[in-house]
Image (spheres, rainbow, N blue to C red):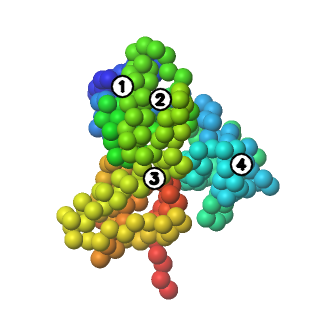
Amino acid sequence: AAKGLADELNDRGYLVVDGIDGRAHYVKLPIGADLAALPLGGIVEVKAAGGERAVDHNIAGIVREGLYRSVDHLVRLRQEGVLDPQTAVDVHVRRLEALRRSGAVERMADGVWRVPPDFLSRVQAHDAQRAAGVTIELRSHLSIAQQVRAQGSTWLDHQMVGNTNDFPPRGFGAQVYGALQERIGFLVEQGLAERRGPHVVLARNLLSTLRDRELAEVGKAIQHQTGLIHRPICDGESVNGIYRRSVQLASGRFAMLDDGTGFSLVPWRPVVEQRLGQQVSAIVRVSSVTWNMGRQHGR
């Protein structure tokens, strides 16, 4: 709802967050946090550093013989009837990739990670050290009003798929509930949802379908501007190219990789920003990505 500098000398900012709980929260940001990356009206998630995360408990619960395998996790989610199991697995893979860079876990192969017995205590220490008080993540640069008819996988869609409907009937919580109802109407128009009495049935793989539609549309626009051929990415595909720029979409932020004759849009991560204008490679699995920044050594 508002932002500014709480301590100009130390470059420390603050946010005023209009919470889903119907209350306003004053949040002091870690030193050096980029205020420009947190737009007014955008959706943010604020957590106490070092607190437990559901994604970490899920990872610990799926580990067998010290290994997390994304294939096993996908099978379990399908057996449990999760609406979009691949997207749920991607969330866990992104978390593991972030923890790999800090040494908390080790990637053994594509989709296979070695997870130590003290995994939960390690990740809590990692989060506490990294955030120095709180962790703040941008969930959407769009306001909920802009998300209602947005082409792409929005924060509102994630709330529906995750069955996160416990919103108090006041303040911002009431606004979110109203926006969800409007979003459902939009999805019905698009053939991606169906009303059955008081219930709503969402299309299978809703999030990935919305994201792919948006990427196809944006890819055509960039192709027209640059003359490069848009190359959609298949699951598990390795992509190489020069990182030209990033594009902020309703489905998230994507990096444009240029291979000389064509380009691909790859889910962006902070680690790739320092490689702007350089050759990079990535392995993409739906909305998750493993970036390869290592130098290529010759003889």
Callout 2 touching callout 1 (CB < 8 Å): yes
Residue type pointed to by label 1: Leu
Q: Is residue 251 placed above or below 28 in the rendered structure?
A: below
Asked whether, in this view, residue 131 is left or right of residue 121, the answer is left
Q: Local crowd at mark 2 within 10 Å, few (<14), some, or many (≥20)?
A: some
Q: Residue at x 51, y 46 (%)?
A: 203
The span from disc 4 to disc 1 (Cα, nearest Å) is 41 Å
Residue 209's disc is 3
On the picture, is 101 further left or further right than 72? Answer: left
Give the CA distance from mark 2 to mark 3. 28 Å
Mark 1 = which residue? Answer: 15
Dot 1 or dot 3: first in sequence order is: 1
Question: Judging from the image, what secondary structure is the residue with disc 3 in?
Answer: helix
- Give the quarter of the figure containing the N terminus: top left
Q: Earlier in the sequence, mark 2 or mark 3?
A: 2
Residue type at mark 2? Answer: Val
User: According to the image, label 4 marks what residue?
Assistant: 79
**Percent x, y for residue 105?**
65, 52
The residue that mark 2 highlights is 46
x, y (%) of residue 211? 42, 51
Q: Do residues under tags 2 and 3 come within 8 Å of each other at their CB atoms?
A: no
For mark 4, does the 10 Å Cα neighbourhood hold few (<14), some (14 to 19), or many (20 or more) residues? few
